[in-house]
């Protein structure tokens, strides 16, 4: 006897802006911690590029944030259109 398949759950579509903001904050905190507490160690061991990596991660977060803001706006628009069709 064939079993009935359960309906598939809706795919998750969470807001993405908080993830982008969390990434920006993480890079900023990592850079500040390295700058304030480990700058001498980084210089002594030739790892000053770690500070540049944190800066690059922070700055690249802004285009990511803009992209996620656009994604969330489209997400709201899609959900509103789906609600109107019901």
Image (spheres, helix red, strand yellow):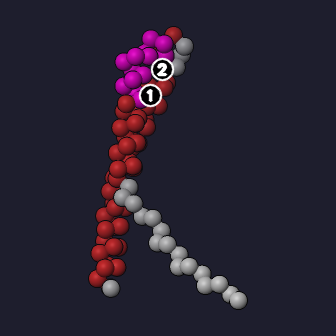
Q: Does the magenta stretch include residue 51?
A: no
Residue shown at 45% from the left, 64% from the top: 12
Q: In the rendered view, does 2 fall on the left or right side of 9?
A: right
Alpha carbons under labels 2 and 1: distance apart: 7 Å
Look at the picture and state if 22 lies above or below 78.
above
Look at the picture and state if 50 lies above or below 63.
above
Instruction: Find numbered disc 2 in the image and state the secondary structure of the residue it sits on.
Output: loop
How many C-alpha atoms fall within 10 Å of the one at disc 1: few (<14), some, or many (≥20)? few
Q: Do the residues labelled 2 and 1 touch (CB within 8 Å)?
A: yes
Return the residue found at the far right: 1
Q: In the rendered view, does 38 fall on the left or right side of 8?
A: left
Identify the mark at residue 52; answer none if there is no mark.
Answer: 1
Look at the picture and state if 73 lies above or below 50.
below
Residue shown at 36% from the left, 18% from the top: 36
User: In this view of the protein, which residue sits in the foreground, 73 or 82?
Assistant: 82
Q: Position of residue 22 (x, y in %)?
A: 37, 43
Which image quadrant is residue 26 in?
top left
Query: What span is in magenta?
Result: 30-42
Looking at the rendered image, the quarter that the C terminus falls into is bottom left
Look at the picture and state if 62 lies above or below 8.
above
Visible residue check, residue 63: no
Give the residue number, with chain letter if any, for mark 2. 48
User: In this view of the protein, which residue sits in the foreground, 7 or 14?
Assistant: 7
Return the residue found at the far bottom: 1
Instruction: Find numbered disc 1 in the image and state the secondary structure of the residue it sits on.
Output: helix
Q: Position of residue 80 (x, y in %)?
A: 29, 75
């Amino acid at each position: 006897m064939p079993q009935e398949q359960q309906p598939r759950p809706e795919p998750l579509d969470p807001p993405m802006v908080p993830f982008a903001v969390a990434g920006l904050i993480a890079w900023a905190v990592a850079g500040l911690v390295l700058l304030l507490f480990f700058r001498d160690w980084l210089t002594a061991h030739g790892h000053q590029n770690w500070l540049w990596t944190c800066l690059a991660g922070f700055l690249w977060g802004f285009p990511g944030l803009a992209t996620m803001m656009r994604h969330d706006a489209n997400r709201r628009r899609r959900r509103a259109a789906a609600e109107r069709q019901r």
